[in-house]
Amino acid sequence: MRGTVAIAGVGLAGCGEAPGWTEMEIAAAAAKSALDDAGLTARDVDGLVIASTNIFMSGLALAEHLGVRPKFTESTMVGGSSFVGHLIPAALALNAGLCDTILVAYGSNQRTGVGRGEAGKYKMALDPQPFEHPYKPFNPPTSYALAAARHMHQFGTTRAQLAEIAVAARRWAQLNPEAFAREPLTLDEVLKSRMISDPLTVRDCCLVTDGGGAYVLTRAERAKDFTKPPAYLLGAGTAHWHRQISQMPDLTVTAATESGQRAYEMAGLGPRDVDVVELYDAFTINTLLFLEDLGFCKKGEGGAFVSGGRIAPGGALPVNTNGGGLSCVHPGMYGIFLVIEAVRQLRGEAGERQVKDAAVALAHGNGGVLSSQITALLGTKDTL
Amino acid sequence: MSPPSGPEKRYLEALAAGRFEIQKCAACGKHVFYPRVLCPHCGSDRLGWVTPSGRGTVYSTTVVRRKSADGGDYNVCLVDLAEGVRMMSRVVSLPPDGVKIGMAVKARIAEGLVEFTPA
């Protein structure tokens, strides 16, 4: 699979607040933006991919909305990691010759549309989870809080170290004109902000925004003909071991240990080869766990690793360069934004936040409650 | 499909009758929680029911913050039972932030749920 497919276009729509827009309209606007970026139109699309937390048969809805009659449709739903995960079946379909141009799109109006509380009630009625819900975990924060508490207990990780992650994300967001939260944020402010589920405060938790994103995937030989430099898929791996937090074997070790290894092996690369890192930071603890599990530091050393601004602008390892889910955008499922930011960095389009000479980018998606883990490595043509 | 119901209903009915029972696999000998059709360790469907000792250890814990008007803060935790299975629950009879990782706890049934008190 290495190097056989490439992303030819990326686009965003409605990030932040998009009052008056439906999920599918935001997804369609993002699709238009990505297709424009690739120099294509919806008429060129013969493969469609989407996932939604709310829309039933979302692949059919997207095709109908765009007027596309796809030869290949894919809607695997593994939470926020889905849109990183979609690279795998999309690449398989392209390599098998099932279709030529795949559009992956996502849209959500969770900030200004139907309230999450309301939607949550309906979901709970259909999917009761009787071994967790009766104890009223405030999910997802409570599940991630349990992981953070365990990591702190086992390795001495501190709230201040977690706060460093929130501050680093905000400093990146301040370099990104498209980020939602750009006002200054200090370590002390994170520590003193409202506690949600101990030890996580509201600033340890991601934003709640609207927004959509899309990317266009084609076979590598065709991607060369597009106007912008393609970002090649070098490796991808997926793993999951649980759905509910009470079934996670060790709350300090995620399945990213496996998904990362699979992606690195396919790419023939390791963590030292990665120039820019995009990690699914629904909560500060995520960034820390994934830095450990993807081999950027040893297990238990994530707290020390992120200290002193190491992952902030100007630090040794650029992580979540758009500002992440913590400060850029998080409409419920953040995965597609990881891929989009990785592509922009590889193309050198990231403006003030551009990582110099970025040739290899890692995008790591998380879904559920540290459940689905999907890692992708993307690279410029020099990495083929 | 010979039993009158699936294992989830069987578990919840026992609990409603005041009995906390978990599954044990007759093939590999491991305990299983939550209740399932197949043993997640070995794949066997020979899952029987046993009464656990009720002794456990807090594996992780959090305080969910809630306005006092809505009932105030409360504990949510993960407890490892002596039988080797983990469950979500709460520890009561002490303030929610008094629950600590590693604390020895004992199960009881209250309001149709398994909850724990310090052992």
Image (spheres, grey):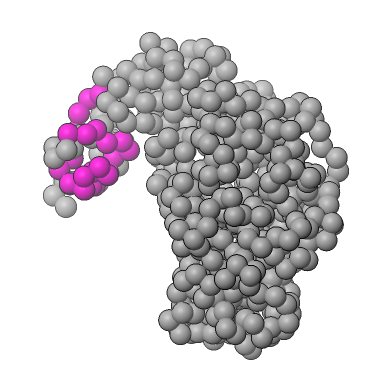
Above/below status of B81 relative to A383: above
Magenta stretch encompasses residue B40? yes
Point out the image quarter for the C terminus of chain A: bottom right
Where residue A372 appears, as percent x and y from the top left, is: 48, 51
- Indicate the quadrant where residue B78 lies: top left
Q: Nearer the viewer, residue A227 or A281?
A: A227
Above/below status of B110 relative to A74: above
**Magenta-drawn stretch, dominant element (helix, strand or loop):** loop
In the displayed structure image, the side of residue A203 where residue B96 appears, left or right: left
> Image point 26% across, 19% down: which residue?
B53
> Image point 42% across, 12% down: which residue?
B118
**What span is colored magenta in the figure?**
B29-52
Where residue A27 appears, as percent x and y from the top left, is: 66, 69
Q: Nearer the viewer, residue A116 or A383?
A: A383
Q: Nearer the viewer, residue B11 or A50?
A: A50
Where residue B22 appears, as percent x and y from the top left, is: 26, 32
Residue B61 visible in this rendered orientation of the protein: no
Above/below status of B105 relative to B113: above
> Image point 67% across, 54% down: which residue?
A276
Where residue B113 appears, as percent x and y from the top left, is: 39, 28
In the displayed structure image, the side of residue A12 where residue A134 appears, left or right: left
Residue B85 visible in this rendered orientation of the protein: yes
Task: Tally the numbered discs.
Answer: 0
In the displayed structure image, the side of residue B24 where residue A41 appears, left or right: right
> Image point 64% across, 52% down: which residue?
A277
